[in-house]
Image (spheres, helix red, strand yellow):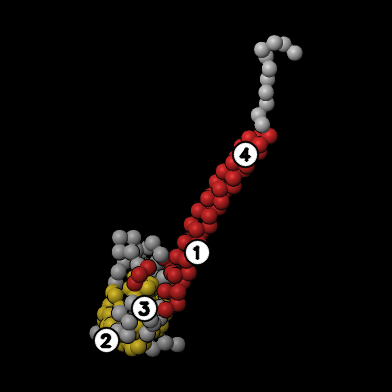
Amino acid sequence: MRYGSERKGISPTVTTAILAAITAAIGLAVFGIASGWSSIAALDFVGEVDKGVQQLKAELVFEHGYIGGGTMYIWVKNTGEIDLVITAIVVYDPDSSPPTPSFSKVAEVKRGETILYKTSSCGDKCLVDVYYVPAPLFDEHEPEKNRDRFLKLTFGIGEMR
């Protein structure tokens, strides 16, 4: 051994403490990442469930309708537990395919409310598709945003075969 070149290693106690600290830091980092991801996933899940519950609370029924003087009169009632927004009403001949609707806010129907909607008739017999969505899911700036949550009520007016 040479004079003045004594080398000493790190003490086993210090080595163990350093390794324990590194292991704890890695464990905390992994825990933080996992808990952050799980809370984001849980919030997304809660949001989807909330939308589904709102959709289940929505119910619109056709009460009455008739055609007179080229005009169709339609009464629909919100029998659900949540306010609704009617996003489109499509009237078409039963012998043809329905046209593609364009969505916007046609009317708002409060819980328990019945509304009258007037539109031009397609003849002496018509099919009507009413598209609606729970009011909290409707975005006036982006009417098609929750299109997958839109519900449809179809009924006929006039002498049907």
Q: Which residue is mark 4?
A: 17
Amino acid carrying label 3: it is Ile
- Write the residue at 37% across / 63% down: 144
User: Is residue 91 among what the camera can see?
Assistant: no
Quadrant in the picture for the C terminus: bottom left
Helix, strand or loop at disc 4? Answer: helix
Q: CA distance from mark 2 to mark 4?
A: 89 Å
Amino acid carrying label 1: it is Phe
Q: Which residue is mark 2?
A: 68
Q: Say whether marks 2 and 4 touch (CB < 8 Å).
A: no
Residue at far front of view: 3
Q: Which mark is residue 82?
A: 3
Q: Which residue is mark 1?
A: 45
Q: Position of residue 152 (x, y in %)?
A: 42, 75
- Which is closer to the viewer, label 2 or label 1? 1
User: In the picture provided, is 83 more to the left or to the right than 97?
Assistant: left
User: Is residue 40 among what the camera can see?
Assistant: yes
Task: Give the image quarter of residue 101.
Answer: bottom left
Helix, strand or loop at disc 3? Answer: loop
Q: Nearer the viewer, residue 33 or 97?
A: 33
- Write the residue at 75% across / 13% down: 1
- Which is closer to the viewer, label 3 or label 1? 1
